[in-house]
Image (spheres, grey):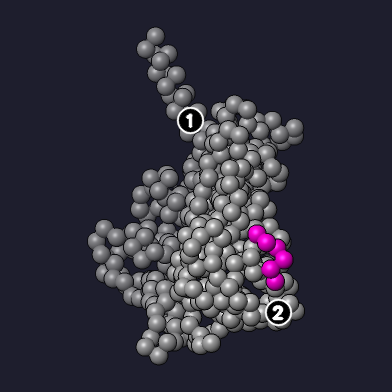
Amino acid sequence: MKSNIKYIIIFFLIFSFYAFAEIYTVKSGDSLEKIAKKYGVTVRDIIKENSLKKPYIIYPGQKLKIPEKKGFIIHKVKNGENLSLIAQKYKVSVRDIIRANNLKKPYIIRIGQRLKIPIKKGSVKKDIETYCALKHKVRPGDTLITIAKKYRVWVKDIRKLNNLQNDVLRVGQVLCIKRGTKKKETKKTKSGVIVKQKKIVKKKIITYKVRSGDSLARIAKKYGTTVKEIVRLNNLKKPYIIYPGQRLKVPKKVVYIEEEIVKRKSIPFGFIWPVDGKVIQNFVNNSQMRHLGIDIESECDAPVRAAEDGKVIFAGDSIKAYGNLIVIKHPNKFNTVYGHIGDIHAKEGMIVKKGEIIGKAGMLKNSEKCGIYFEIRKNTVPVDPLVFLNKKTNLDKKKN
């Protein structure tokens, strides 16, 4: 009985060895470098995977475990999954999974099967994990439309950001709503010139004196390079034996900060606050309430300015709900709406510049406070102005 258990354990270990690692039989003329190149891994990876000792000599017929190629992850198939769902989850194509696993028609997968998933640089999954500034976990009843309304974004942007092929969502799925960006370090000089700081990484060849206990793999790890690169630089011959006191050329990464002076330029397309004041009523658009702009309280008769370059397409008081009203048409299919103006200075058909005075603040609706009502519309659809305006309500003061 004990003998049978022993054989079962040995069989299990052998099976595990072959089931989860790719095995290569060394042939005549092979070298670690040649094998590593064939499988797209490093010499160091093979040495580590097989616990090889110095001087790392291999021989024909030797069995070597080939480590998983970097750029792949392992997915264990679960109940109800198919190749299409798995591909969608990892933002790769079904064809990529088939090729990576050498699947044959009719491409049947089973529960518990381990699949290699190729992960490409800059994949959406990586972007979501690293650069996604705002995420949403799908709940029962969620749709792309309800999620877009909740975060006040466009459905097409959610589709594009998450590489969605259709509108089907699954409970628990994580969606990236807004992608973040790495902030570039900048500093202002007294002269008002902006200086950008950029990190530069370069390689520098240094001379390294081999110490007792050193190996090519250890030296490569210390200086962030590869065994192959050290071998090439020093024209080392197989079996790549090194000894204490030997001097080696080693590439070392050098990081330094480069400053680039950038002259201040005029502000590109973007909305400024139409009046200097504070918001006392926010944008609301739901089944209980509709307030499709913001109320900005200001001083009475405060100058009202055009939020962006554009053409005045309406100026008058014929729409009673808005009082004295100005509507300006802008590039990129935007319109801005200025309601409850005291005095109107602009005329229909007039071309106005960003910051140009178009009127004075009047009395807000159903209030004893002065200010204006302000809307921003994209493709005639009202959007929250606070999404497009700076957090600070300070205006560039211009003389009348």
Q: What residue type is labelled 1?
A: Ser
CA neighbours of label 2 inside 10 A, class few (<14), some (14 to 19), many (20+): some
Q: In this view of the protein, can residue 399 be seen by the observer?
A: yes
Q: In this view, does 193 lie above or below 285?
A: below
Q: Is residue 391 above or below residue 304?
A: above
Q: In this view, does 228 lie above or below 359?
A: above
Residue 347, numbered label? 2
CA neighbours of label 1 inside 10 A, class few (<14), some (14 to 19), many (20+): few
Q: Is residue 4 above or below residue 31?
A: above
268 vs 316, nearest the viewer: 316
Secondary structure under the numbered disc 2 in the rendered image: loop
The outermost residue toward the top is 1
The outermost residue toward the bottom is 191
Q: Where is residue 308 in the image (x, y as percent from the top left)?
A: 61, 75
Rendered residue at 53%/52% (across/down):
128
Residue 16, numbered label? 1
Q: In this view of the protein, can residue 26 be seen by the observer?
A: no
Give the distance between the C-alpha atoms of the residues marked 2 and 1, in whole angstroms: 81 Å
Rendered residue at 70%/46% (across/down):
165
Q: Which amino acid does label 2 sit on?
A: Lys
| Front: mark 2 or 1 | 2
State yes or no: residue 153 in magenta: no
Task: Please tell me in which quadrant of the rendered image residue 212 appears.
Answer: bottom left
Rendered residue at 42%/73% (across/down):
185
Q: Which of marks 2 and 1 is nearer the N terminus?
A: 1
Rendered residue at 48%/82% (across/down):
397
Task: Please tell me in which quadrant of the rendered image residue 95 appears.
Answer: top right
239 vs 18, nearest the viewer: 18
Q: Give the range drawn in magenta.
A: 316-321
Secondary structure under the numbered disc 1 in the rendered image: helix
* Cβ atoms at labels 2 and 1 below 8 Å apart: no
42 vs 363, nearest the viewer: 363
